[in-house]
Image: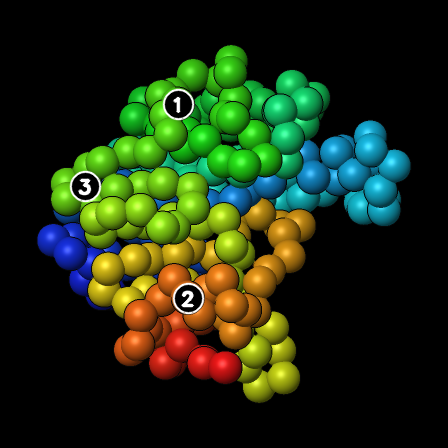
């Protein structure tokens, strides 16, 4: 089940998948899809991974769109593992993505891995102010911000679990992509960003809320 909470003027839902839903705006937000990661690793001589992450990620995204009925989507950057991965997207996956975009307002936020797809449609921007929130790739700016980039994870019952982090001013989403690692919430970068009283919303079969672990 999703977890409902408030960020500034907005009533939001953290979904067990790692997606964020804003019911009043009909908006689904996901971060760090990293589509094409296996292709990028093979191209650059890295470790070889089974090339299934793109359809697996698209399947999860499609399910979230169906479940929420979202009318608009924000992808918070690093949607592709790099620009060449976007250009090398399998035709079937490209058509799948285009179908999901059809009839929806779709916003691509620039990330550090990619500047955003150039030929898939939708709007491309550095950040998106909307309804009193600011959507950007990396936390650290002004306002009530929603961001990604760090792929936060928390250790729970001996397992590493993806999580949202929020302190009432900032919200950091977990990575949504199938082949994405993560940064432990005890890392100095995350500790410095989140104020005392911050919470971790752990993803999984249902969302679990806990105080953000501190060093």
- Give the residue at the far bottom of this rendering: 157
Which of the 4 image quarters holds residue 26?
A: top left
Gap between marks 3 and 1 measured at Cα? 19 Å
Which of the 4 image quarters holds residue 192?
A: bottom left
Image marks 2 and 3: residues in contact by CB distance under 8 Å:
no
**Where is residue 194 drawn, in percent x and y?**
36, 66
- Give the residue at the far top of this rendering: 119
**Does 172 sit above or below residue 70?**
below
Q: Secondary structure at mark 1?
A: strand
Viewer-nearest residue: 135 or 2 = 135
| Drawn side of residue 74 relative to residue 111, left or right | left
Going from the N terminus, do you reach mark 2 or mark 3 first? 3
Q: Residues within 10 Å of mark 3 (few under 14, many from 20)?
A: some
| Drawn side of residue 56 relative to residue 185, left or right | right
Label ID, residue 25: 3
At 54% from the left and 36% from the top, the residue drawn is 112
Q: Secondary structure at mark 3?
A: helix
Gap between marks 1 and 2 measured at Cα? 29 Å
**Where is residue 77 drawn, in percent x and y?**
47, 37
Question: Which residue, given by chain and number where applicable, does mark 2 sit on?
Answer: 192
Viewer-nearest residue: 124 or 56 = 124
| Drawn side of residue 93 relative to residue 133, left or right | right
**Where is residue 118 drawn, in percent x and y?**
51, 16
Which of the 4 image quarters holds residue 128?
A: top left
């Amino acid at each position: 089940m999703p977890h409902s909470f408030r960020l500034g003027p907005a009533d939001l839902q953290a979904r067990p998948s790692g997606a964020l839903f804003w019911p009043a705006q009909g908006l689904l937000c996901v971060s760090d899809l990293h589509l094409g990661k296996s292709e990028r690793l093979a191209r650059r001589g890295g470790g070889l991974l089974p090339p299934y992450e793109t359809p697996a990620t698209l399947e999860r995204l499609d399910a979230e769109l169906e479940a929420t009925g979202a009318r608009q989507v924000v992808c918070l950057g690093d949607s592709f593992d790099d620009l060449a991965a976007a250009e090398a997207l399998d035709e079937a996956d490209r058509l799948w993505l285009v179908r999901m975009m059809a009839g929806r307002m779709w916003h691509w936020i620039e990330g550090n891995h990619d500047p955003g797809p150039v030929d898939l449609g939708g709007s491309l921007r550095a950040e998106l102010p909307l309804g009193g929130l600011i959507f950007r790739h990396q936390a650290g700016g002004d306002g009530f911000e929603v961001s990604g980039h760090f792929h936060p994870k928390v250790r729970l019952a001996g397992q590493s679990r993806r999580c949202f982090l929020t302190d009432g001013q900032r919200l950091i989403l977990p990575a949504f992509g199938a082949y994405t690692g993560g940064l432990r919430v005890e890392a100095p970068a995350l500790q410095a960003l989140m104020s005392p009283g911050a919470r971790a919303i752990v993803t999984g079969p249902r969302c679990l809320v806990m105080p953000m672990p501190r060093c």
